[in-house]
Image (spheres, rainbow, N blue to C red):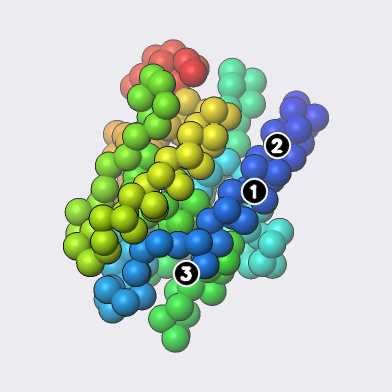
């Protein structure tokens, strides 16, 4: 079991090395800092960490992600015999890495979910698609070519990620309230929650497909 976990970790870390290099700050085509003085995605947006992504960011930055009190730890299955915890920042609190200067402390190592925003991945049977978070000012201020470049870049990247991404993660991304009703509580308190049983109860064996 440990051998399988370590093999997956190595595979994901190698993927993050490539993905983070391809989406470094200077490659961004969206004028985020110019059009959004309220830093909306830092305050009222969920951030979903990919498998092993919190550990990767910890390795790169020395910052505590897994043990941060503002980050949910969601235990989900990779397979019938292996489970793993992933991180989630809810929309009810400021991102713990948003500093006093209104900058991201881990910007060069921020999660892919932050990098691709306002594009949110949809996982059809084949390929990858996006829905866009309508409140993001970049959708109004960015040029059509900037949005096209952003979409094409991240569609290619999420396409590669989706090839090894567990079906359980894809289901959780779009069914968070059903699988984690605690997150709808008034001022929910982030904590460790095991959703393995909930996935089986709500979706049967669907989470094992793909």
Q: Foreground: 43 or 29?
A: 29
Label 3 sits on a secondary structure element that is loop
Residue 66 appears in the picture as rendered: no
| In this rendering, the label closer to the viewer, 2 or 3 | 2
Q: Mark 1 = which residue?
A: 18
- Image quadrant in which you'd find residue 106: bottom right
Q: Find the distance from the CA under tag 2 to the CA under tag 1.
A: 11 Å
Q: Mark 3 = which residue?
A: 96
Neighbours of disc 3 within 10 Å: few (<14), some (14-19), many (20+)? some
Neighbours of disc 2 within 10 Å: few (<14), some (14-19), many (20+)? few
82 relative position to 206: left or right = right
Residue occupying image coordinates x 60% and y 36%: 84
Label 2 sits on a secondary structure element that is helix
Residue 121 image position (x, y, % from top left)? 37, 40
Residue 121 badge: none
Residue 163 image position (x, y, % from top left)? 54, 28
Q: Find the distance from the CA under tag 2 to the CA under tag 3.
A: 27 Å
Cβ atoms at labels 2 and 1 below 8 Å apart: no
Residue 139 image position (x, y, % from top left)? 23, 59
Q: Mark 2 = which residue?
A: 11
């Amino acid at each position: 079991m440990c051998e399988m976990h370590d093999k997956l970790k190595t595979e994901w870390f190698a993927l993050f090395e490539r993905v983070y290099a391809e989406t470094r700050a200077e490659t961004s085509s969206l004028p985020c800092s110019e059009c959004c003085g309220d830093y909306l995605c830092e305050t009222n947006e969920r951030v979903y960490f990919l498998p092993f992504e919190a550990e990767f960011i910890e390795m790169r930055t020395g910052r505590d992600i897994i043990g941060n009190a503002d980050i949910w730890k969601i235990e989900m299955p990779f397979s019938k015999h292996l489970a793993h915890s992933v991180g989630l920042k809810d929309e009810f609190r400021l991102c713990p890495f948003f500093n006093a200067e209104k900058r991201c402390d881990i910007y060069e190592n921020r999660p892919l979910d932050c990098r691709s925003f306002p594009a949110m991945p949809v996982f059809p049977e084949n390929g990858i698609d996006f829905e866009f978070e309508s409140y993001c000012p970049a959708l109004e201020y960015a040029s059509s070519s900037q949005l096209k470049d952003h979409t094409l870049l991240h569609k290619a990247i999420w396409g590669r990620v989706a090839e090894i991404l567990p079906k359980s993660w894809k289901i959780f991304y779009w069914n968070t309230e059903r699988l984690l009703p605690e997150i709808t509580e008034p001022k929910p308190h982030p904590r460790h929650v095991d959703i393995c049983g909930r996935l089986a109860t709500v979706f049967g064996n669907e989470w094992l497909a793909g």
